Image (cartoon, rainbow, N blue to C red):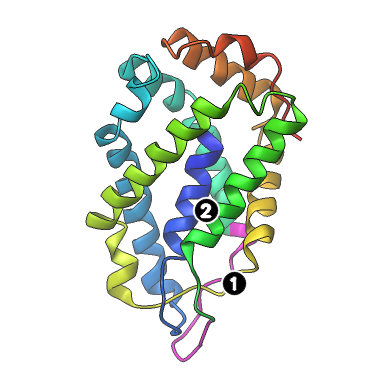
Amino acid sequence: MLLSIVLFGLICFVRSQLIRECTCDEFEPCKKSTIHSVMQCADQCQSHITSLGASYPAARKCLHSKEDLLNAVMKCESAEFANACAKGPGGKVPKRYPETLRIAAYSELNAMLARSGIQNQAKEYMAAGKKFLACISRCSERGGGNCFKKLGCGLALPPDNVIVQTTKKCAIRNGFNTQAVQEMCHCMAKAGVRNLERICSKIQVS
């Protein structure tokens, strides 16, 4: 779930459909606004978490317990994609579609679950996670995430699969490893997510 949120942050940033490249001066404030909006929207979309049987306040604590980790991963991403925005105006970038990045992200998550041997057991949680992130996306578009749409510019980013793999490397490098994911899984299970405990110890981040 935490990795999904990190990836969602990037999905927000490639939402532009115009070809003017965002300057770093306009991009950075917009990025901060979007991140803040995502966290607020998560609370508004809590029904998709409680539908799995969880107490949202307890589940929220699980996510916030990894907040430092989340910030470290996003800092790593910013460093990896430091040249995505332009130092000055005049640049052009290809048209990008956030849906294709979302598909690439889900494909990697499904592959990871398959390697862990729990893809079928995790289907219910993946479905709820997709609805949760879609809800956050709609909410964010009405709030801070709308900032990028108003700017009417895009970023010079690599192909979607490269973005996903870079995010994954940043996550693992900053401690979002098998142990950390299993810890959060156990925490969410204790928060009340139905039948989650049975797969927590099987999850392997690879």
- Residue at the bottom extreme of this rendering: 90
Please indicate, yes or no, whether residue 171 appears anywhere in the rendered image: no
The local secondary structure at tag 1 comes to loop
Give residue 206's quadrant in the image.
top right
Q: Position of residue 155 (x, y in %)?
A: 50, 73
Horizontal relation, residue 13 to residue 174: left or right: left
Please provide the residue range marked out in magenta: 79-93
Relative vertical location of residue 79 with respect to residue 130 in this rendering, above or below: below
Measure the alpha-carbon separation of dots 1 and 2: 22 Å
Q: Which mark is residue 83?
A: 1
Element class at badge 2: helix
Residue 193 appears left or right of 105: left
Which label was assigned to residue 66? none
Q: Is residue 63 above or below residue 193?
A: below
Residue 161 colored magenta? no
Location of residue 64 with respect to 186 vertically, above or below? below
Identify which residue is drawn at 69% across, 60% down: 162
**Does the magenta run of residues contain 81?**
yes
Which residue: 68% across, 21% down?
179
Asked whether 206 or 180 is in front, the reply is: 206
Residue 142: x and y in percent read 22, 56
* For discs 1 and 2, the disc positioned in front in the rendered view: 2
Mark 1 packing: few (<14 Cα in 10 Å), some, or many (20+)?
A: few
Residue underneath mark 2? 102
Of residues 68 and 181, the one drawn nearer to the viewer in this rendering: 181
Question: Callout 2: few (<14), some (14-19), or many (20+) C-alpha neighbours within 10 Å?
Answer: some
Q: Amino acid at mark 1?
A: Asn
Quarter occupied by residue 151? bottom left
Q: Residue at x 43, y 77 (%)?
A: 22
Give the image location of residue 137, x and y in percent: 35, 50
Which SS type dominates the magenta stretch? loop
